[in-house]
Amino acid sequence: MADPRNGGKRNLIIVSNRLPLSVKQTDDGTYQSSISSGGLVTSLSGLTKSTTFKWFGWPGLQVDDPQDREKVSKSLAAHNAVAVFLDQKLANQHYNCFSNQILWPILHYQTVTLNESAWESYKKVNELFAESVADAASDGDLIWVHDYHLMLLPGLLRKRLEEQGKFCAIGFSLHTPFPAKDFWRALPVRKELIEGILASDQVGFHTDEYKQNFMDSCHSLLEATIEPPDKIRWKGRWIIADSFIVGIDPQKFEDTLQKPEVISRIKELEEVYKDKKVIIGVDRLDYIKGLTLKLKAYDAFLDEHKELKNKVVLIQVAVPSREDVKEYQDLETEISTMVGKIDGKHATPDGSPLVYMHRSVPFTELTALYAVADACLLTSMRDGMNLVCFEYVACQAKKHGVLVLSEFAGASSFMNGGCITFHPANTKELSDAIYRAITMRPDERESNYNQLRRFIDKNTSARWGETFIERLTKCTA
Ligand code: ADQ
């Protein structure tokens, strides 16, 4: 809803588990906040032009002293951010133990066992968020809740807002897949979680498949009425459930590619790899991204195509992620071991066909890497959407590089033949896909590229945010 007090802009409250800022204590005891990067931040960047928003979330550090909390809040206020303070143990139980060790796997088709105390912490943290957001919301605000860490929040919020006599339209966006109903029902608290989401006015998914899975669960577990294509009737209310295509801001990449330091970095990299086909992979170090499958297939590809040994290089950036969770520590060890074996087996005095970077890289370097790569290889076992593939396309206007994308990434359902798809656990299929990518004819590359480019230019992050918010606004009418 446009608010005349904000020059006609809408008031929007965005809620996500972590604030998109890093907060640090300086030597003089004050706190400084700076915006950090990440999938959700990238996606929301387009909204700022039309909307005034406040962002609620955990600031990522433990602050117990009330005076310190005040200082942190002040530094966040400069970025329109509001901290939901959590005790470290509670935050750990909510984030690592329930969200990332139970919800994340089940949403990505991995089996799990319920940890009761983690579930209690999950409920408690969602309550704390509800308290903080409901108290700050004004009648008529729009509230947009993000992701699996806060599935109970719409329900808890609606109750509090009603008690306070405020009406706010509530939207919920899930950034992961939503699994098929027979998989979701394996989770003992399956009903509570979807009941929480159903207190929203509008629920957004990346793809129609996830939306349909969610509707199927609502119908079979809660006996909600489904009115295709996009409505659910539950406890006397209508809820919109739909897919909204999350995108990127292609202009940000175009602009970065024009920077002198990026232009010279691209030249340097082109010189280093002048006789080689470069394949780029950029993934958070997460088992859903299928990195072990990628390495296994790349090893098979090198075995099969010995003639290409010194003519191809896979540059794999693996961004450290969730390092407090044991599964992620074990995965890192497994990947390092595989990288060592591939290197040992295929490297020659002239170089290695594999460059593994286990760290975050600066945005300018990331852009340069995308720009020089002849192909981008993404092998997710499951992935809500995958923004990296769009970012690669945004940087390939000159080369028309080939996108090689797992059929299990949400993005693949929108590519309509513009990329090479494969089953990530089928080593031969994946190895063949790599070969096809680096040997593709220029005319085929160009026509594929043009198709992908049209898609990313049309479905930007700004459009995603606008579309979601426009439709949510109608729920207030
Ligand atoms: P992620 O699993 O994090 O997001 P993805 O969609 O690929 O996956 O987004 C990663 C983002 O991090 C990209 O914008 C990328 O540029 C950035 N990034 C990657 N490597 C980086 C590096 N080295 N340094 C700095 N930034 C880096 C979740 C879901 C996805 C879904 C998104 C958005 O798992 O499926 O697409 O949310 O909804």
Image: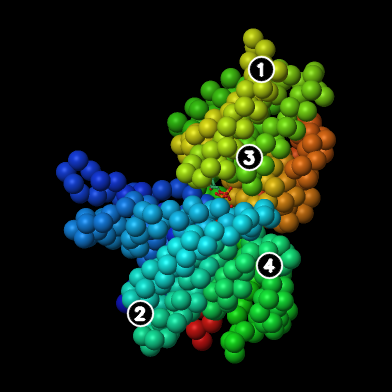
- The residue drawn where x is 33% and y is 74% is 136
Distance Cα–Cα, label 4 vs label 1: 45 Å
Distance Cα–Cα, label 1 vs label 2: 61 Å
Residue at disc 4, CB closer than 8 Å to ligand 1: no
Residue on which the image places disc 1: 344
Q: Earlier in the sequence, mark 4 or mark 1?
A: 4
Q: Earlier in the sequence, mark 3 or mark 2?
A: 2
Q: Earlier in the sequence, mark 1 or mark 2?
A: 2
Distance Cα–Cα, label 3 vs label 2: 45 Å
Tell which residue pokes out farthest to the front in this image: 116
Numbered badge on residue 185: 4
Name the mark nearer the viewer: 1 or 2.
Answer: 1
Q: Residues within 10 Å of mark 2 (few under 14, many from 20)?
A: some
Is the image coloured rainbow, by chain, by secondary structure, or in one colour?
rainbow
Residue on which the image places disc 3: 396
Can you say whether 424 is above or below 382 in the image? Answer: above
Q: Which residue type does callout 2 highlight?
A: Ser
Q: Earlier in the sequence, mark 3 or mark 4?
A: 4
Q: Earlier in the sequence, mark 1 or mark 3?
A: 1
- Residue 163 as seen in the image, left or right of residue 273: left
x, y percentage for residue 440? 79, 34
Q: Which residue type does callout 3 highlight?
A: Gln
Can you say whether 317 is above or below 170 in the image? Answer: above
Distance Cα–Cα, label 3 vs label 4: 42 Å
